Image (cartoon, rainbow, N blue to C red):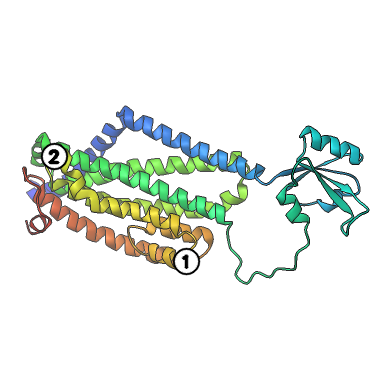
Amino acid sequence: MIPTTARVAASTPSAIWLVAEREIGAKLRSKAFLIGTGILLALALAGVLFGGFAGKSAGQTAVAVTAETAEVVQGVDLIDPTEVADRAAAEELVRSGDVEAALVPSDDGPFGYTILALEEAPRTLAMMLSQSPEVEILEPQTTDPMIRYFIALGFGLVFLIAASTFGGTIAQSVVEEKQTRVVELLISAIPTRALLAGKIVGNTVLAMGQIVLLAAIAVVGLIVTGQNELLAGIGGPVVWFAVFFGLGFVLLAALFAAAAAMVSRQEDIGATTMPITMLVMAPYMLVIFFNDNPLVLTIMSYVPFSAPVGMPMRLFVGEAQWWEPLVSIVVLLLSCVAAILVAAKIYENSLLRMGARVKLREALRG
């Protein structure tokens, strides 16, 4: 005959997976969740496509040139030249609006050419053709500031949406089970910690699935818009983001479940989960405002709650050494273990306590 402890140990993985399946199935049967995910993916694809096509067209100045002035703009990416026979043909294109300006030969002035414009000469063209002293950059930027900002926005927004959505789902599920007394039936059949672990596993699978779909959408969008260089640069950081997010979400999910177990009504969830929600929002705000600050990004990459955003961002801009993600992963793993142990104690001591909100000190003391 199998000892009781051995039977419980053997059944615990099955119990965890049963709870995880229940969590996953409940979400996949929810029309609100499916519609919301579809809208999120559509918005992500639209954003990538718009950014790609806008980036191609931004700064492209249509200019009419003649055979004498064509070499002036040859090889300039921001100018779309249209060669015409003479000055009269160039002026006609400007007047018709087919081009923004024309570059025609001129005997007057030091340059040997003149810009023709209908009302005002394009500043981009004038600046590119103007003479300026040689510039030597001592600390060149590794990435375009605009691209850097949008990558930071992407990492921060995805982390915020996924963590808050599925963290909130766990909290609501815990309180709903307490309100309906379903939890009493559940823990009579499976260990309390297996119930907690199942909720974490199920929602982590859902969150990671959403992250993978978003990454696939981004890859498709970058390929369609021909942004192969950006795709090559962002591929590694995206993989690291998925790894860090998976571990970071486990930590946050455990805390959301523990915080929710301390209350018995849906209206009280906000009171106990507010500190965790602030921890989810902080990385988003920091990476938006300090994406060009190496010190802040370095600190973020080693703090467990912000590492899923900070470290991939530093990898994208090339500011992290090869060993830093590994050290950050170790810190995050240790933090996960500590958070799960604390959350499990709070969850066990609060789950069956109905009525008034359980104080944190009482939940820890049991």
Residue 255, percent across and down?
23, 52
The answer to whether residue 96 is above or below residue 58 is above
Q: Which residue is mark 2?
A: 265
The quarter holding residue 288 reads: bottom left
What type is the residue that disc 2 sits on?
Arg
Camera-nearest residue between 129 and 303? 129
The quarter holding residue 130 reads: bottom right
Say what secondary structure mark 1 lies in.
Answer: helix
- Residue at image position (42%, 32%) is 38
What type is the residue that disc 1 sits on?
Pro
Asked if residue 355 lies left or right of residue 54, the reply is: left
Q: Which residue is mark 1?
A: 294
Q: Tell which residue pokes out farthest to the bottom in this image.
A: 138
- Residue at image position (45%, 36%) is 41
- Residue at image position (28%, 50%) is 277
Asked if residue 281 lies left or right of residue 83, the reply is: left
Spatial CA distance of label 2 from label 1 is 43 Å
Asked if residue 49 lies left or right of residue 338, the reply is: right
The quarter holding residue 101 reads: top right
- Residue at image position (67%, 47%) is 59
Residue 2, percent across and down?
10, 47
